[in-house]
Image (spheres, rainbow, N blue to C red):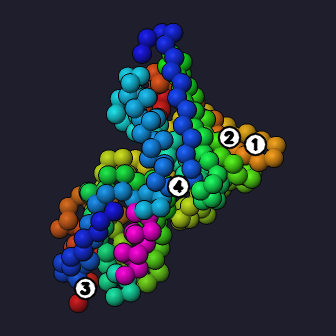
Amino acid sequence: MKATNRTVDGVEIIALQGKITIGSGDTQLREVIAEAVNTGKTNILLDLSGVTTIDSSGIGELVGSYTTVTNRGGKLKLLHLPAKLNELLHVTQLITVFEVYESEADAIASLKPTA
Amino acid sequence: MERGDSERIEITVSSRFENIELVQVIAEHLCENAGVDEDGSHWIGMAVREAVANAIKHGNKLDVRKKVHATFELQDLDLEITVSDEGEGFDPEKVSDPLNPQNLMKTSGRGIFYMKTFMDEVHYSFRTGGGTSLVMTKNLSKGSGIASTKA
């Protein structure tokens, strides 16, 4: 898995590419999120459009990431869910946990820190 | 695949996560060759991925000396997949329901749920002296296997 970070209006946008599966991308995702929150970036938008494969471990890490960020007073939202990932979140009812956006601008507006 | 056709494939791998995809790909190709669409093959492949991952992690506890054995048997459009490990087994009754609100935010415990979602039936058996076998069946003439589209 590859992660690319950029900051827009105080929102950390992390684009994930590749696999988030057991033994590879799952631990990487945990590290990427930990690094972001440890450097004070707690408004996070995960762009998942480049995710090619995810399994139950990857789904678990998404849940763990959400908990890590919210426990630090931040917010984690999802952008551009691939269809199969969307299905996996639906059948486990996790879609009720995550806020999902199709528009980056709308997602940033919802996460942007208020003055 | 025509009526009366059958196919049997066996593979044994050591307990390394990088071997999961190898077994998954066999499942997907077998399904595609039987005429299952890309989505349906993907979901069956994912059920296999979860089964092999559990066998490696929870069954064989990442001991590379221990093997995971997978068998794919296709008779007409009835697919039976068996994934066996050399571990100590577990109590399926103690596996928590990931849809229970108390478990919703847990970071693990969804693998078996996904298998049951994508396949028609999932059963476990435990051998005396160690080893768990997971048997999953799927009639390939049915839908893609995702719960929301199941009849």
**Residue B148 seen in the figure:** no
Please state the extent of the stretch shown in magenta in the rendering: A25-35
Q: CA distance from mark 2 to mark 3?
A: 55 Å
The quarter holding residue B1 reads: top left
Residue under label 4, please give it.
B16
Query: Badges 4 and 3: C-beta atoms under 8 Å apart?
Result: no
Which amino acid, by three-letter code, is at mark 2? Ser
**Disc 3: CA contacts within 10 A as few (<14), some (14-19) or many (>=20):** few
Mark 1 / mark 4, whichever is N-terminal: 4
Give whichever of A27, B143 is nearer the camera.
A27
Q: Which mark is residue A114?
A: 3
Q: Is residue A115 visible?
A: yes
Three-letter amino acid code at the position of disc 3: Thr
Q: Is residue B66 magenta?
A: no
> SS of the residue at dot 4?
loop
What residue is at 21 percent from the left and 79 percent from the top? A7
The residue where tag 2 is placed is B133
Q: Which quarter of the image is occupied by the N terminus of chain A?
A: bottom left
N-terminal of the pair, mark 2 or mark 4, is 4
Which marked residue is nearer to the observer: mark 1 or mark 4?
4
Host chain of mark 2: B
Q: Position of residue B27 (x, y in %)?
A: 46, 35
Q: Amino acid at mark 4?
A: Arg
Q: Are callouts 2 and 4 both on one chain? A: yes
Q: Which residue is mark 1?
A: B126
Mark sitting on residue A82: none
Mark 2 vs 1, N-terminal side: 1
Few, some or many residues within 10 Å of mark 2 (<14, 14–19, 20+): many
The dominant secondary structure in magenta is helix
Circle 4 packing at 10 Å, graded few (<14), some (14-19), many (20+), is many
Q: Give coordinates of residue A74: x percent, y percent.
A: 38, 80
Nearer to us: label 4 or label 3: 4
